[in-house]
Amino acid sequence: MSSDPWGRVDETGTVYVRTAEGEQVVGSWQAGSPEEALAYFERKYDGIVVEIGLLERRVKTTDLSAKDATTAIDHLRQQVDEHHAVGDLDALRKRLDALVATVEARREERKVLKAKQTDEAKQAKQALVAEAEELAQSEQWRSAGERLRALVDTWKGLPRLDRKSDDELWHRFSHARSAFSKRRKAHFAALDAQREDARKAKEKLVTEAESLSGSTDWVTTAARYRDLMTEWKAAGRAQREAEDDLWNRFRGAQDVFFAARSEVFAERDAEQGENLKLKEELAAEAEKLVPVKDLKAARAAFRSINERWEAIGHVPRDARPKVEGRMQAVERALLESEESEWRRTNPEARARAAGLTGQLQAAVDKLRGQIDTARAQGNNARADKLAKELEGRQALLDQALKGLEEFGG
């Protein structure tokens, strides 16, 4: 018979293990010596020890589930309870009991942790829902849309709650997103309609602008282009592609008209500049008549100068008062000479005064006729220019008539 502290083999080859409850039969050994039998079952014990040690480390260092850990413990306990090993089986049972306690403690910890995580997830989802419902009323379409998409990604990263709570929160969250999408769609549909209306309105403006590009009615057409620009700004923006194309056409039509006007005005300005030189020469020629020495010769010379003056045409507006003032100064000098002559020879003076007055009256009548003609033709700018010239001539005529009346007739 052979034995050790934890087991023995009797003379029949039966192997026993010692436990707190007494000896338990391990098995029968007939293939060799008793020592070999004990060594064999001790190795089986060592194998169980290794398995328990591995399970203890897994429970301690990994996220092994309580269910899987319990299954593994039950499997090892079954091996210990079946007494197919020689060793301190009671110690193994104690280790397994301690492991069960550890697993249960871990189970409770995980339960508490899961409850905490669930509560945090619920609060997080409630916060997402509240933000989504607030964003649903926003009109910051781009930023709000991007934020809602980010909230969806955040939602997907959160753990699920119980079905009822999760479904209720998701329904509110989804409804908020749908409400925002519906409002955004309606907004852009209305915006598209407005842009289409703007496109149609601007098409009409472009058509008119292009039809006016060849006009030579510079004043009226320029004013109309200003009105068209005001209407363009009031029409709102069309779709980007259409807006750019329409603006290029609109601006192009304007450019054609104003380039042609600039060219004509440049020619006119050059012509008026030449006219100014000629009138300045005539004014200088008229000024040589003063002081008046031979009234009859001076009147004849002034009539000749004045006829040439009338034939020249317009001068630049800013230069007109000065050059016309020079001629009017000569006319006043001639009138003063007439008055002096009247005082010496009444009949002849009256006749001469009447002659000069007649010339001025004819000039005034001519200007009035030209003004009426310009008004009838719709050329208000020319009519206004002639009206200013008429004021000067009328003043001279009034002065001449007053002198004639003072002379007694």
Image (cartoon, grey):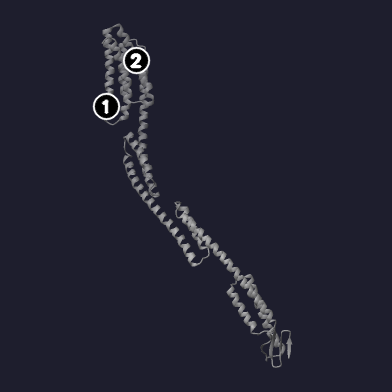
Q: Is residue 313 above or below residue 60?
A: above
Please tell me whether residue 394 is drawn above or below residue 409 in the rendered image: below
One can see residue 49 in this view: no
Residue 281 sits in quarter: top left
What is the crowding at mark 2: few (fewer than 14 residues within 10 Å), some, or many (at least 20)? Answer: some
Where residue 214 sits, quadrant-wise, is: top left
Left/right placement of residue 228 relative to residue 51 reads: left
Residue of label 1: 372
Q: Which residue is mark 2?
A: 332
Q: Nearer the viewer, mark 2 or mark 1?
A: 1
Q: Quadrant of the N terminus?
A: bottom right
Amino acid on which the number 1 mark rests in the picture: Asp
Residue at position x 57%, y 64% in the image: 116
- 121 left or right, relative to 258: right
- The amino acid on which the numbered mark 2 sits, given as a three-letter code, is Arg
Residue located 34% across and 43% down the image: 205
Quarter that holds the C terminus: top left
- Residue 225: image x %, image y %? 35, 38
Dot 2 or dot 1: first in sequence order is 2
Q: Which residue of the protein is positioned furthest toward the front in this rendering?
A: 21
- Residue depicted at x 61% and y 77%: 72
| Residue 212: quarter of image | top left
Figure label count:
2
Label 2, secondary structure: give it.
helix
Of residues 202 and 264, the one nearer the viewer is 202
| Residue 140 place in picture, x, y as percent | 46, 51
Tag 1: Cα neighbours inside 10 Å, few (<14), some, or many (≥20)? some
Residue placed furthest toward the top: 344
Q: Circle 1 — which element? A: helix
What is the x, y in percent for residue 257? 35, 38
